[in-house]
Amino acid sequence: MRGIFNFSAAAAALILLTACGQKEQAAAPAAAPEVVAPVPVVAAAAENALGKSVFGKTCAMCHAAGVAGAPKPGDKADWGPRIAQGNEILYKHAIEGYTGAKGMMPARGGGSTLSDDEVKAAVDHMVGLSR
């Protein structure tokens, strides 16, 4: 009987150890799921709504068709040298008016009630379309 007892005791110990190991595995906290940080969404550059509106209501009368030498928005060849002068010169010419070799720009594009900020926004809109 002693051989049976030893076998039974060994089998019982093995079962207990196996069961114990399973309980430990089951009781062990689950590994935390991998946390992936969300990719930040870069907002598209804010549209210059004011400039677009002023352009459509006032500036487009000349600039859309190139009247009196007005550079058409998107014409990089015509806008390039103007843009190279810097925004302050573009603003000054648009606000005060300008006569040059290619034509003339009436003060405030002929929109005498436009504020400086509205004129600048329209210039920024056209420059943005022409870079």
Image (tube, helix red, strand yellow):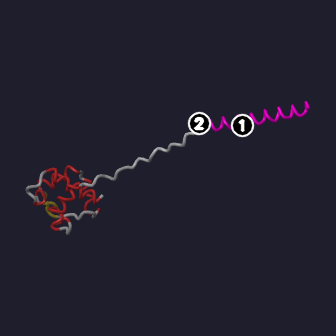
**On the image, numbered disc 1 is attached to which residue?**
19
Amino acid on which disc 2 is placed? Pro
Please say if 130 is above or below 89.
below
Amino acid on which disc 1 is placed? Ala
Please say if 9 is above or below 44.
above
Q: Which mark is residue 35?
A: none
Q: What element does badge 1 sit on?
A: helix
Q: Residue at x 14, y 62 (%)?
A: 104
Of the pair 122 and 28, the residue shown nearer to us:
28
Q: Is residue 11 magenta?
A: yes
Dominant SS type (magenta): helix
Q: Which residues are magenta?
A: 1-28
Distance between mark 2 and mark 1 Cα atoms: 17 Å
Q: What element does badge 2 sit on?
A: loop
Please identify the quadrant where the N terminus is shown.
top right
Q: Please identify the residue farthest to the front as the structure is shown.
A: 1
**On the image, numbered disc 2 is attached to which residue?**
29
